[in-house]
Image (cartoon, rainbow, N blue to C red):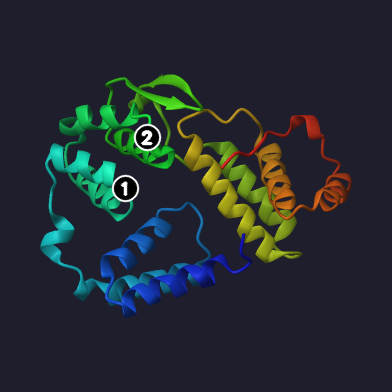
Amino acid sequence: MPDNYYDELLAGIRKNMEQGHYDSANAMIEEELSMPYVPSKVLTELNELKKELKPYLSKEKEMKIMSPEEVSKALEKGGEAVFRALRTLDNSNIRNYLDVIQEYLLDDMADRLVVSMLIEACQKQQVSTPLSYYHQGKRQIVVPSQLKGMFADEAVNEAYGVMVRILESQNPSFLKQCEQVLVQYVSLNYPQKITVSGMNLAYSVIRYVYLAYDDEEGFRQFARAQQISLENLVDIII
């Protein structure tokens, strides 16, 4: 897990632009801008790069509305094609694509992150049709119109606040990694309800990052200093 996530992200975007891979660069920018937290300096740079990219993107291609069959193929293909499919869904009546969406949600090979993004796309358009999907091998049923947005849960916002308060002044690079892990965890579990408090979610994420560095003793010291009750934490799986 790199210390300089944002530096590598921006370098990757610029490299794609230099090589003429404008769609890939744009997809990276759009993905990062969709995150609930982006440092203000990075946000400014991303928006500047987005402006630089605009003349190189085909307006016709960017705004093309896919048919349900094309959306299905794009979801199956994965990668950048998924973002094009999602743009179509965001700019269309998503109810016309529910059969395709439902088919993908139940596909054994479905990308769990894409499942979350499709359900949230339906939530944004207040779809009241129940949808089935798999989460950790178990079939779930959800009504998108009854959901909140992916990062609208109070526990997620509280977890951000806890991590910033504890880590921002002491270890900002560690904080960046924790933020990314939290985003991944929430994204890969949506629309499952978060069952722990924001504080315990924050501590769970922090524990995950410590253990990713194989620094169990470091986390024990952190837990003692923060008086953390370990039995209240959850396993972070990403």
Rendered image: mark on residue 78? 1
The residue lying toward the viewer, choosing from 222 and 199, is 222
Q: Viewed as shown, does residue 48 lie left or right of 22?
A: right
Which quarter of the rendered picture does the N terminus lie within? bottom right
Specify whether 223 is left or right of 43: right
**Residue at 32% from the left image edge and 76% from the top image edge:** 17
From the viewer's perspective, is 169 left or right of 36?
A: right
Is 230 located above or below residue 225 in the figure? above
* Towards the viewer: 174 or 139: 139
Query: Quadrant location of residue 43?
Result: bottom left
Q: List x then y, in percent, for residue 36.
A: 48, 51
The disc at residue 163 is none
The correct choice, above or below, for 136 with respect to 117 in the image is above
Disc count in the image? 2
Upstream in sequence: badge 2 or badge 1:
1
**Circle 2 residue:** 109
